[in-house]
Image: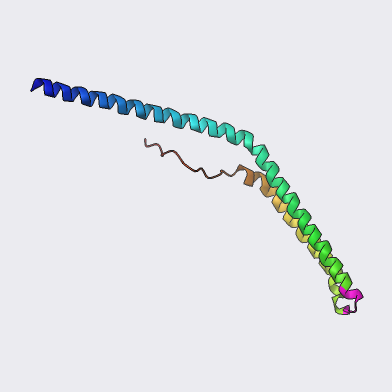
Amino acid sequence: MKSKLFACACIVLALSFVLTGISYCAEKETAGTKAKNFWQKLFNYPANVTNESAAVVSDTAKRGTEVVTKEVKTVGQVTSGEVAKTKELVTEPITGTAETAVKAVEGTVAAPVNAAKEEPQAVQPPAEQK
């Protein structure tokens, strides 16, 4: 009877050592992941700002092209006899340029903020309980 009790105690003790070791390794892995994520974010931030800035420049160029295209169409309409479009010939470029400038400024200001946003992770480590 004593040998069975002793054997069970040894098994429980061995099992607790194994579980403690696994828990310790998992905790160290989480800490290493946090450090790795910090350095990744630190070096990825300039690249993300560049991507966001390029998107703003591209959007601004697209909007500018749309303003010019719309103006050319309006000129064509006025020259073909639609005199009522003359007002639009003057106001559309001003409002289009102003809207494009506003969007460019908004995008430029928001680029660093958007670049700093965290990307969703596929698998997140479990939350630590204290």
Residue at screen point 40% across, 36% down: 128
Residue 79 part of the magenta-drawn span: yes
Residue 103 x %, y %: 72, 56
Task: Indicate the colouring scheme.
Answer: rainbow
Residue 37 x %, y %: 54, 34
Quadrant hosting residue 10: top left
Residue at screen point 87% across, 74% down: 77
Q: In the rendered image, which quarter contains the C terminus?
A: top left
Name the one closer to the observer, 4 or 78: 4
Name the one closer to the observer, 1 or 63: 1
Residue at screen point 41% across, 30% down: 27
- Residue at the far right: name it: 79
Quadrant hosting residue 9: top left
| Image-based side of 93 in relation to 53, left or right | right
Magenta extent: 77-83
In the displayed structure, 109 sits above or below 32; it is below
Quadrant hosting residue 75: bottom right
